[in-house]
Amino acid sequence: MRRAGAWPLALALAAAACGDNALTGSDPATQGQRQGGTASARPPVAAVGGVRVGLEVLDGEKGGALKGKKVGLVAHAASVTGEGRHAVDVLKKHGVAVVRIFSPEHGLQGQAAAGAKVQNVKDPRSGLPVVSLYGEKTKPSAEDLKDLDALVLDLQDAGVRFYTYISTLLLCLEAAADAGIELVVLDRPNPLGGDRVEGPASDPRDAVPASLVNMAPGPLVHGLTVGEMARFANAHREKAAKLTVIAMKGWKRNMVWNDTGLPWVPPSPNLKAPAAAIAYPGTALLEATNVSEGRGTEAPFQLLGAPWVETPALAGLSVPGFAVEEAKFTPHASESAPDPKYKDQECAGVRVRVSDPHAARPYTLGVTLLAALRKSPQFQWRADGALDRLVGTRKLREALEKGESVEAIVAADEAAIEAFRKERREALLY
């Protein structure tokens, strides 16, 4: 667990990660990306002083309606203000009685490897019990919530369905409704922005079983903040939960992370920089193959390859908003990647850079990479059906195996995307 005084250190390290210059130099005339790459001429404009996340808004309200209440807090390492104060400290400062902490995948420190089970522990910094929602259970139990007035959720999401924090949100919404207590969501930016919507919706559950990587409704890249997703999901419940969303101040839908003025605190150990977050919905699809997605390197989800990859075929790919360059890299074991693909073997491949974060189409990037890699006789899908689980549908894999073009695969989702854009309108806060 995090030692005393370590939250500011995490923030300092994250601020250093923001030095990735792949997101600089974008032309304001291209900002405001929409499906299909159409751009808006209106640049994003933050409020004076930058974006204030829900936690900071609650801080300004001196705890607001939560003051004096007993709460459980769903949080992780990125649950901080712009100055690095953690949600536990902000709530306690204003007389909110934090009874216990709940941690999602990667744990309260945000250091556990992807998929690694997280144990219940005691936080040595606050002395509070930490109940894992990524271990023996994924949803708070009735016993966990019985003495609480509210469950407060403050998680930085990545804006793509297979990032498990939205599934944790949905399960917490269900648990709060079952327990008859309020769920309070402290909202944070979608690092992909609120206009970018890409990819397929999930298949019916009899086709692809539900898991933490495919629970969220809507297309794979949904364009919602955590608070908006809570509103959308709650509106579709048979019995709505008591839900309050503390909205941000100054956030606009056409903002990507570097427009917010906020430091990047990695919400998981391999999502090291805003550029990686932009590429992630596409490059993470390589997890379902025998190609390295860069775990165990200095740039996960931006370094991609394998010892057998023919680099020129990949380096010539063209996808809006991205530059793909030849690269060699060697994955090594680490705490966040204890057994990476091709450990200690040199891989040939590419480095993906974000040339225009507003025009970038990450899902299209992922489909383009998979279509190119499948041409190699050494390419393999993981045998456990990982791609179907990641995207929530068998359609992508089946289309690739039939040799359908990238353009046709992407276009097949357009009608459902436009329908979702209309359906989500009442849930939007910004």
Image: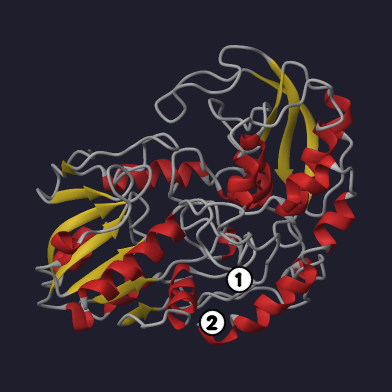
Q: In the rendered view, does 177 fall on the left or right side of 226?
A: left
Q: Residues within 10 Å of mark 1 (few under 14, many from 20)?
A: many
Taking 391 as reference, is 415 above or below it? below
Q: Residue furthest top?
A: 345
Task: Give the colour scheme of this rendering.
Answer: secondary structure
Vertical arrangement, residue 287 with respect to residue 268, above or below: above
Residue 46 visible to an observer of this rendering: yes
Helix, strand or loop for disc 1: loop
Number of numbered callouts drawn: 2
Amino acid type indicated by mark 2 = Leu
Which of the 4 quarters of the picture holds residue 33?
Answer: bottom right
Mark 2 — residue?
Answer: 428
Q: Give residue 311's position: percent from left, percent from top.
A: 83, 25
Residue 152 in picture, x, y percent from top left: 27, 68
Marks 2/1 in contact by CB < 8 Å: the verdict is: yes
Q: Residue at x 20, y 42 (%)?
A: 120
Q: Nearer the viewer, residue 205 or 379?
A: 205
Determine whether 314 is above or below 275 in the image: above
Q: Residue at x 50, y 82 (%)?
A: 429
Q: Is residue 121 above or below residue 142?
A: above
Label of residue 194 in the image: 1
Q: In which quadrant will I find the N terminus? A: top left
Q: Quadrant of the C terminus?
A: bottom right
Residue 85 visible, this orientation: no
Residue 6 in the image: state x and y as whole percent.
25, 42
Residue 43 on image: x %, y %: 69, 74
Q: Is residue 255 left or right of residue 357?
A: left
Amino acid tagged 1: Gly
> Which one is earlier in the sequence, the residue at label 2 or at label 1?
1
